[in-house]
């Protein structure tokens, strides 16, 4: 059962509020389980969650607001299943909450719109070997859209955030041989498995920062669209995205440098024909990012090189 309301008081105050009651009843049976795992489990539970956002609609185009939300979700695996071990240890249903305060604005006859906000979010993620890991993310977001004139517009987005993994982080993870003082030859060219990152001397017994997530990203794009011409219309968009450095999750991490990627797109419309050209990573920037999940400390993903895409559309 749920309720969603959008309430306005006078012309100044707006309140969006929601409430939800969920009843859960599940049975889980893993026919291919290991001998140390639970073969089958059942559970039932109910949870009440709610959210509210209060805004002030000021005459000058400014809209300050504050939001609070609580939610719950089942800890599903990749195939949508729920592991019996999560049911047996009571971690199959997780809660999260979000606190956000910000300012939206609509200025200069709607030629400058956007918003800035600060958020604090607590949530969970399902790690390997059916371990639920709690995380806390705090950060600031900015979005601006400026309509310079009838032909030119610009967009700026920026984020600054930090994600903390709450300990003890008992998840399973792979680590490189050098992290435990071995040479690649001594490890036969492979990596080592750590079954509890919290109890390992190269791990973290308490809270630690998720350095594999960039702290800062900034994107700036400019767009030009011509006036309607005798033969049709044309336009272009050019933008750059900056991503700050990242690192592996070890006390002696590998650092992946910050990078910038430039993207370009062009289009032309002639009657019922549209031709577009998109070039991603225009300057062919070489960059790397740490892999996700269990392999975050042992492998990196190369960034995508320059890509061209030409699209021709014809309507009849």
Image (spheres, rainbow, N blue to C red):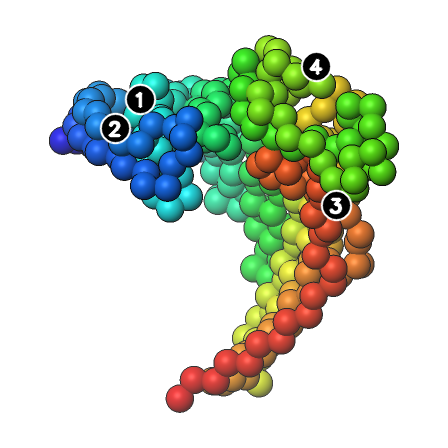
Q: Earlier in the sequence, mark 2 or mark 4?
A: 2
Assign a secondary structure to mark 3.
strand
Vertical side of 82 occupied by 49: above or below = above
Estimate the x, y position of residue 89 in percent, counting from the top left.
34, 19
Front one among 50 and 177:
177
In the orientation shown, which residue stands out farthest toward the bottom? Answer: 316
Q: Earlier in the sequence, mark 1 or mark 2?
A: 2
> Could you say whether the residue bearing mark 2 is in a helix, strand or loop?
strand
The numbered disc on residue 201 is 4
Q: Residue at x 69, y 47 (%)?
A: 301
| CB under 8 Å between discs 2 and 3 | no
Q: Which residue is mark 2?
A: 41
- What element does badge 1 sit on? helix
Mark toward the viewer: 2 or 3: 2
Crowd around label 4: few <14 · some 14–19 · many ≥20 (10 Å): few
Residue hosting label 1: 88
Q: Is residue 210 above or below residue 266?
A: above
């Amino acid at each position: 059962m749920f309720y969603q309301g959008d309430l306005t008081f006078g012309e100044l105050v707006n309140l969006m509020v929601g409430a939800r009651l969920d009843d859960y009843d599940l049975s889980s049976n893993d026919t291919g389980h290991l001998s140390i795992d639970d073969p089958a489990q059942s559970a039932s539970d109910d949870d009440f969650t709610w959210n509210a956002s209060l805004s002030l609609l000021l005459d000058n185009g400014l809209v300050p607001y504050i939001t609070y939300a609580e939610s719950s979700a089942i800890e599903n695996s990749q195939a949508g299943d729920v592991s019996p071990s999560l049911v047996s240890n009571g971690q199959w249903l997780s809660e999260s909450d979000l606190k956000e305060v910000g300012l939206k604005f609509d200025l200069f006859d709607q030629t400058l719109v956007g918003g800035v906000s600060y958020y604090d979010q607590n949530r969970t993620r399902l790690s390997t070997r059916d371990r639920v890991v709690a995380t806390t993310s705090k950060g600031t977001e900015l979005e601006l859209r400026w309509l310079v004139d009838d032909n030119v517009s610009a967009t700026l987005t920026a984020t600054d955030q930090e994600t903390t993994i709450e300990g003890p982080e008992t998840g399973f993870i792979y680590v490189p041989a050098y992290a435990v003082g071995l040479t690649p030859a001594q490890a036969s060219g492979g990596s080592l498995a750590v079954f509890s990152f919290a109890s390992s001397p190269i791990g973290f017994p308490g809270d630690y920062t998720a350095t594999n997530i960039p702290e800062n990203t900034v994107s700036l794009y400019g767009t030009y669209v011509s006036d309607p011409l005798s033969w049709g219309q044309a336009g272009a968009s050019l933008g750059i995205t900056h991503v700050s450095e990242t690192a592996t999750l070890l006390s002696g991490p590998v650092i992946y440098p910050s990078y910038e990627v430039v993207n370009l797109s062009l289009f032309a419309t002639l009657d019922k024909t549209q031709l577009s050209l998109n070039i991603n990573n225009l300057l062919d920037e070489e960059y790397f990012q740490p892999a996700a999940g269990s392999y975050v400390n042992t492998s990196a993903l190369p960034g995508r090189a320059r890509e061209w895409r030409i699209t021709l559309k014809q309507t009849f």
